[in-house]
Amino acid sequence: MKGKVTVRLKAGVLDVEGKAIEGALAKLGFNGVGAVRVGKVFEVELAETDPAAAKAALTAMAKGLLANPVMETFEVALEPG
Amino acid sequence: MKGKVTVRLKAGVLDVEGKAIEGALAKLGFNGVGAVRVGKVFEVELAETDPAAAKAALTAMAKGLLANPVMETFEVALEPG
Amino acid sequence: MGQRQPQPPYDAEILRGHGLTPAEYARVEALLGRAPTWPELGVFSVMWSEHCAYKSSRVHLKRLPTTGPQVVQGPGENAGAIDGGDGWAVVFKMESHNHPSFIEPYQGAATGVGGILRDVFTMGARPIALLNALRFGRPEHPKTPHLVSGVVAGIGGYGNCIGVPTVGGDVMFDASYDGNILVNAFALGVAPKDRIFLGVAEGVGNPVFYVGSKTGRDGIHGATMASEEFSEGSEEKRPTVQVGDPFTEKLLLEACLDVMAEDILVGVQDMGAAGLTSSSCEMASRAGSGLVLHLDRVPMREQGMVPYELLLSESQERMLMVCARGKEARLIELVSRWGLDVCQVGEVTETGRFVCTWDGETVVDVPVAALVDEAPVYDRPQSPAPPAACVEALPEPSSVGKALLDLLGRPTIASKRWVYEQYDHMVRTGTVVRPGAGDAAVVRLPQTRRGIALSVDCNGRYCKLDPFVGGALAVVESALNVACVGARPQAITDCLNFASPERPEVMWQFAQAIDGIAAACRALDAPVVSGNVSLYNETNGVGIHPTPMIGMVGLLEDASTAVGSAWPAGRSLVLLGGAMPAFGGSEYLLMQGHALAGPLPDLDLPAARALIDLLLAAHGAGLVEAAHDASEGGLAVAVAEGCIQGDVGARVDLGATALALFGEAIGRVVVATGDAEALLARAQAAGVPARRLGFTGGDRLTLAGTDAALPVQALRAAWEGAFPAVVEG
Amino acid sequence: MRVAVVSFPGSNCDDDCVRVVGEVLGRTAYKVWHADHDLQGPDLVILPGGFSYGDYLRCGAISAHAPIMADVADFARRGGAVLGICNGFQILTEAGLLPGALHRNAGLHFICRDVHLRVEGLATPFTAGLAGRVLKVPVAHHDGNYHADADTLARLEGDGQVVLRYCHPDGVVDAAANPNGSLGHIAGIASAAGNVVGMMPHPERCAEPLLGNTDGLAFFQAALQTLGG
Ligand SMILES: Nc1ncnc2c1ncn2[C@@H]1O[C@H](COP(=O)(O)OP(=O)(O)O)[C@@H](O)[C@H]1O
Ligand SMILES: [Mg+2]
């Protein structure tokens, strides 16, 4: 089974990379671009076959390692198939 | 409208970060974890309201800036709502 | 083997794809007495590539001087070494990663640094310093900002992470590099003199170990790619890029040094270009032995890999070790502690053959000599390039002050702070003279009072105008830089970047440059201990300027006596050296919108030698408080740079003509001294032309006889602002 | 004084810290392996700079889970003095031994240069007696941009836990002197009890005359005094 953990910066945290990309997009001539936020996706292959257990494992990984609760929020999902 | 560009390393390209995370997850006692691949998500606010035009803009941004065609592939999507 | 692969006879397309001419392929068949298997074809292709076989350059490289009492290890090994004193060997080498960096600037530059570091720690030396020499196209070329940012980030990304300080370098911009940038990385390490490790596969029956990262499909055909000129299509071809993993390299470095601290290894070599193939063949060749590799045992990153790929992969951060029999368990224990893959993949044999098996079946069986000694060597035709046009005179600037500010703002001359502040240049707490602080970097020789001085230099424009003179001047400039901080030049490494050797004019440039370098090395007693050749730096028939980069290493008895290039206040400025300036190839010439033209600055090797000896004697006598050689931009720029760095003004008489102020010559050094009389007396005794230029003090630079009376702040703004403007717009 | 310097895979400044304590100050310093569980009775533990685990995922995130960190946490809980420098600071925040987090520099570049620091806040083993001093110390990092939520920040400020701030040579604190965009121009903080300190700048890099600057020695000398020679 394949799972996915998406990690994003919390709303109040300044996204320095996102800001730089906004600027670069504007310079490249892309108009009408508002805020850009940058996050990470971790795609994880799991031996687990039970969806609920797999989701629980992904959540534990996110809490324990993949996301930093001081600055980040996360979301887990299973890949279809 | 809000769009999303997901950028991933191409299949043959070594994911050094993913490899390090695999090792760390194993040490933390997560068993049955296979390969971990790390990607990025860019969430972009767009003034554009036409879905087809928005997707085209996201694709252009991905090609021009957000993804590195030598090593990465990308995927664009519009956020519901 | 289950996978379909091409079988002989191979068509012309396949052979071309492997960089083999019909004649070369015929020779392969003659040497084998049969057609090569598919993996054998791959092996010949990389071993006979320009990159591995030096087939166009070898006949010329022989003319370089490579011996001297200071030489501990000359060319031919993974890196060269000199005697650093107190039982230390100083190990160094420079290498190019030009093509990969143009395709993927971050990873290309990063893996260039990774590769040169492995060359140094393969010898048993702990790397303590990195330098980088970069050449980019015109600042206004649309690709330049992206290439500069990517290359600099990649060099920093690798060196910072592995914890080796990047202490210096060199950056120049010129249209000739528009389609072919140069990324040359230099690494220096130190080892106990009696514990240098060589790349030899000795001792029949000794096990051969694979250590480090797993093998993937990265950069297959990288070595042949590095030997081919770019064509329109190659940006699209985009071979799988090698990705650097400095973290793994750090583990590999520590693991290797742990292993090397004990008597475990017979020989060791990193897997660089052409990976497993070249490391094993070269080790067998040096020892006159044979080698068998069981390819199915190689740690693999991907499924379905075949012998051809395993042999040609350029995955990074891997080493091949020949272990003494009976020491296998200890080797495995030491490497495993660092969490790295280690496994026995073969043995040393007495057959003189390179044999590879796959699930018990022999897939490669080739005489090592056929791959190494029988590799083609060409003395390619040469024809002299037509002599360059010469400028008779250039208009005097309407304002000297403005011309000086404009020159300081030329990206080639401007401050490189934007670059070196992205490099950790202080880790390991050995950096005595930091980038930007002196003409050469100085690092301490661990556990001693001694210092090692390093500099990389080459002006491709001079080499384009006259490759002999240009090559010699590159050596002279690097030696002067080292002498300016107070170090005696010892030896060089070179990285010879040229266009296609198949063009007689380029081949002539190459041969001339070699002769110029050789002459200067002899005159300065600084032999060549290591180096690298990068050919085919051209796109669609347009070549780069010949750019034989020189990395000079010097030694100081006492690192604490090193001096920088910042003028102190209240001192005399004295010019040492009488080289005659010229406009040829100068920054001033190009700034006038003029095409590249001669005449070149003077080359006088005995005078350069005398100047270096004088500088070192004066330094020893405490007469040199700061020193800066005049190079790009000429004398006025050299004086101004010292003012900016020292945050002090000066009142000097440099002459009032554009030629005196901005003409270029290699062989002139400005020294700040507290005792000008004594310095001038020494110069006279040594037969070195010298003259007093003026004094430092105040907060503006005044050039006598001109309109220039510029606040140091204005000089700084021009000099510091230009580089960020190129990259960040 | 016995100083344990923890080596994680990818630590680069462990030897540099050992050198200052051992060779410059003539005290005992030794390296401790991340995978072991033995601090060997130190008076002070240093988590050194570098790129542990390649800075992959987030700086310090993987090291924060190393076996030795349980012992470091224990040592800290009992009041032991712990100094995290650069990557060591990142590890301390990831391990929850210090509040907040360090993220990407505002300029997005790695930055290596001298900065000035103003010492303030509560007296820690590393800053005791230095309050009000301005010291020149180099930084070398990609992720030194300190972040904490508003409540945490207010608490840090209120309790004197901000112990180092980026400033100009004359001590003036402002954005122009801040190399990385960190909130409150914070360069270093202490735990509530003051015994755990994290700082982005590298005092071990400026503790010898040969290197042209000895300001960094002040932190080590303060530790010598507070921790009993
Ligand atoms: N690519 C680079 N990497 C690191 N340091 C660099 C680089 N390029 C230039 N520098 C440093 O910037 C300073 C000025 O370089 P440069 O302009 O070439 O000096 P000069 O013209 O006096 O030889 C030197 O200390 C040099 O080492
Ligand atoms: Mg230069």
Image: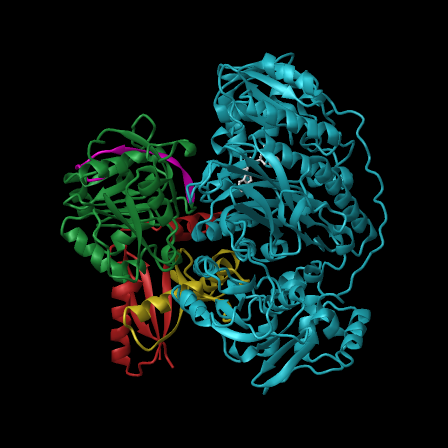
Chain colours: A red, B yellow, C cyan, D green
Residue plotted at (52% across, 29% down): C564
Segment colored magenta: D111-127
Residue plotted at (35% across, 80% down): A1
Residue plotted at (69% across, 49% down): C496
**Picture layout, residue D94 above or below residue C590:** below
Q: Position of residue C532 (x, y in %)?
A: 66, 52
* Ligand 1 picture quarter: top right
Left or right: C604 in relation to A1: right
Q: Position of residue D140 (x, y in %)?
A: 39, 43
Q: Position of residue B58 (x, y in %)?
A: 46, 61
Q: Is residue C581 visible?
A: yes
Q: Nearer the viewer, residue C109 or C297?
A: C297
Q: Position of residue A47 (x, y in %)?
A: 34, 80
Q: Nearer the viewer, residue D106 or C433?
A: C433
User: Residue lying farthest bottom?
Assistant: C2
Q: Is residue B77 visible?
A: no
Q: How many marks?
A: 0
Q: Nearer the viewer, residue A5 or C88?
A: C88
